[in-house]
Image (spheres, rainbow, N blue to C red):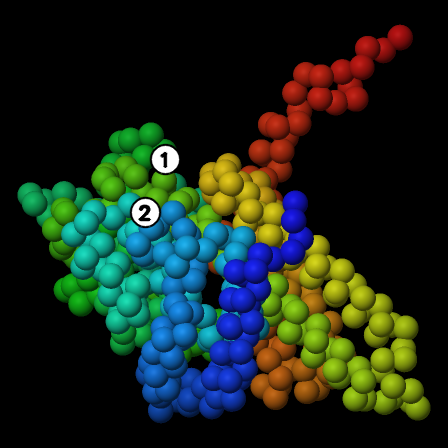
Amino acid sequence: MLFEYSEKTQNLIAKLQAFVDAHILPVDKEVHAWNGDPANLWKPWPGLEPLKEKAKAAGLWNLFLPEEYGEYSPGLTNLEYAPLAEIMGRNGWSSEVFNCSAPDTGNMEVFAKFGTDAQKREWLEPLLAGEIRSAYMMTEPDHACSDATNVRTEIRGDGDDYVINGKKWWISGVMDPRCKVLLMMGQTNPENPRHTQQSTVIIPRDTPGVEVVRAQTVFGDVHSPGGHCEVHLKDVRIPKENIILGEGRGFEIAQGRLGPGRIHHCMRSIGSAQLALELMCQRATERKTFGRMLSDRSSIRMEIAKSYCEIEQARLLTLKAADAIDRHGAKNAKDLIGAIKVIAPQMAQTVADRAIQIFGGMGVSDDVPLAGIMATQRFIRLADGPDEVHASQLGKFKIGQYAKPGAGWNDIPSD
């Protein structure tokens, strides 16, 4: 395994970091102030689109899309994209500047991988151009959708149409005025075997019957302009050609969508944790308590050392998972994807918590990004499947892999 990034990747890292330093960090406080102003609720910061044009002109656009998608991709592998996503993860809103933010990234992959030519023309191309945004609708308030086979929103055939009824919640991005298309997982075939009951369909955002019931807060914040909402679907009618791949393929599509998306979250989590580590190191050299600098106290040094070790461990595991996806596909890298999804956000949450403690009162304020990092990482431990689900599936997989005749000490004959 090579531990040095290729020259191509190193050049992109330098180029992306220079762009962030020149165009994103100088306006960071302005963006947060805009998004936090109730008068601007659900309105994107006006400077965002000009920044996107600069990113396009610099060749820093759609970096996430794997090389196998040909004409739509900038030609990066997951391994090459990892350090770029880490840079974006140091700032909560910067991914969108490069058209690399969820939920659009996962939705674009669905369209690119599974969509028809007509679906690609209508939805993928404007998403790739950054002209529209999208949402993904899977989770339901009445069913535990950490098990995707529990999805119960009804998709029923009616002539040449499907009619949809159900409830969804934690739908990210649906309140953004630029959101024009929804990908929704629902149940078309309840009589089928468990993993072929669900399907994925395309719902234009302005379709009659799509009703946003409420904005949901995350630790007291609605996260404008995208937000997270509860959405009810009542007699929503779409043409049958709006199905993705075919009836009963929803679980397969969800797994294909969530695999890369999970590792993107982990890459950004590591960037957030790295920023928290750097901030706590800076703080330790600026504050004196009881006659000594914080940096001279062994307890502070231990917290910093542990944080560094944990970040490096998570980074290497993420790079290994990314490389495994590139070499063998997400399906064959599911153990590593599951492992890093368990490790990375918990690690980032813990590092941010240590940094907050070192900063004291300032740490829980908006003067530094630590409280936001900690809250986001706690949320990400639930997004794309809770820790427990990933750990349970990983444990089941490893038991099946290792608990075989001849694989353990208990197969040694006794006297």
Looking at the image, the residue that sits furthest to the right is: 291
Residue 199 vs 191, above or below: the answer is below
Q: Residue at x 79, y 63 (%)?
A: 306
Labelled disc at residue 195? 1
Residue 196 vs 234, above or below: the answer is above
Please identify the quarter of the rendering in which residue 214 is found. bottom left
User: In x, y percent, where is residue 285?
Assistant: 81, 85
How crowded pointer 2 is (Cα within 10 Å; few <14, some 14-19, many 20+) is rated as some
Name the quarter where the N terminus is drawn.
top right
Element under disc 2: helix
User: In x, y percent, where is residue 151?
Assistant: 35, 46
Labelled disc at residue 314? none
Label 2 and label 1: CA atoms lie apart by 20 Å
Pointer 2 residue: 113
Residue 384 can be seen in this image: no
- Depth order, front residue of 279/60: 60
Q: Residue at x 78, y 19 (%)?
A: 410
Looking at the image, the residue that sits furthest to the top is: 415
Judged by depth in the image, the label closer to the viewer, 2 or 1, is: 2
User: In x, y percent, where is residue 179?
Assistant: 27, 69
Left or right of 364, for residue 19: left
Q: Residue at x 45, y 86 (%)?
A: 31
Amino acid type, callout 1: His
User: In x, y percent, where is residue 82?
Assistant: 54, 58
Residue 324 can be seen in this image: yes
